[in-house]
Amino acid sequence: MNQEEFVIFAELNRDNFDEILQTLQSYFEHIEYGRQGDDWIWIHLGAEKIEIDSFYSMNLEVKGKLGHLPVVSQILAQLQADSILEVFDPPKLDLTR
């Protein structure tokens, strides 16, 4: 895998959306989010972003370029243990792209 490939880093508990969002808002300045059928949070990193959404899963998938792994690791370290369902090590390819 190369650093530019889109991957899924982890799955989060969708029931904890509000707690996850609150936690992320305390660490990141540029966040967009919504809840309309699907739940989604986008953490903007300059021209790129990390996506946390339920578009292709019943849970929240943490997705982005493989090169975002250090930032995603920081994100996961801040979340409550009951918010994290599974961390993929190594991350798996995002086949929806």
Image (cartoon, helix red, strand yellow):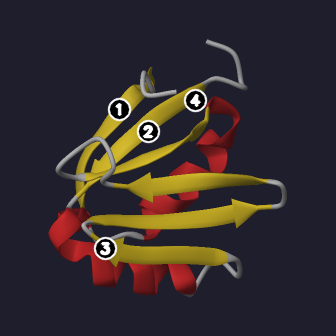
Single out the mark in the foreground, 4 or 3.
Answer: 3
Q: Secondary structure at mark 1?
A: strand
Of the residues tagged 4 and 1, which is closer to the observer? 4
Closer to the observer: label 2 or label 3? 3
**4 or 3: tag closer to the N-terminus:** 4
Tell me the tag on residue 6: 4
Label 2 and label 4: CA atoms lie apart by 10 Å
Which of labels 2 and 4 is toward the front? 4
Mark 2 — residue?
9
Q: Amino acid at mark 1?
A: Phe
Tell me, yes or no, whether the two marked residues, 1 and 2, touch with CB atoms within 8 Å.
yes
- Are there few (<14), some (14-19), or many (20+) residues within 10 Å of tag 2? many
Please name whichever residue, 5 or 84, is drawn nearer the observer in this view of the structure.
5
Residue positioned 39% across, 27% down in the render: 89
- Element type at mark 3: strand
State which quarter of the image contains the N terminus. top right
- Label 1 or label 2, whichever comes before in sequence order: 2
Q: Measured from the top left, where is residue 83 in percent x and y?
A: 24, 65
Mark 3: few, some, or many residues within 10 Å (few <14, many ≥20)?
few
**Spatial CA span between label 3 and label 1:** 27 Å
Mark 1 crowdedness (10 Å alpha carbons): few <14, some 14-19, many ≥20: few
**Furthest residue to the top?**
1
Residue at image mark 3: 36
Looking at numbered disc 3 in the image, what kind of residue is underneath it? Gln
Q: Which residue is mark 1?
A: 88
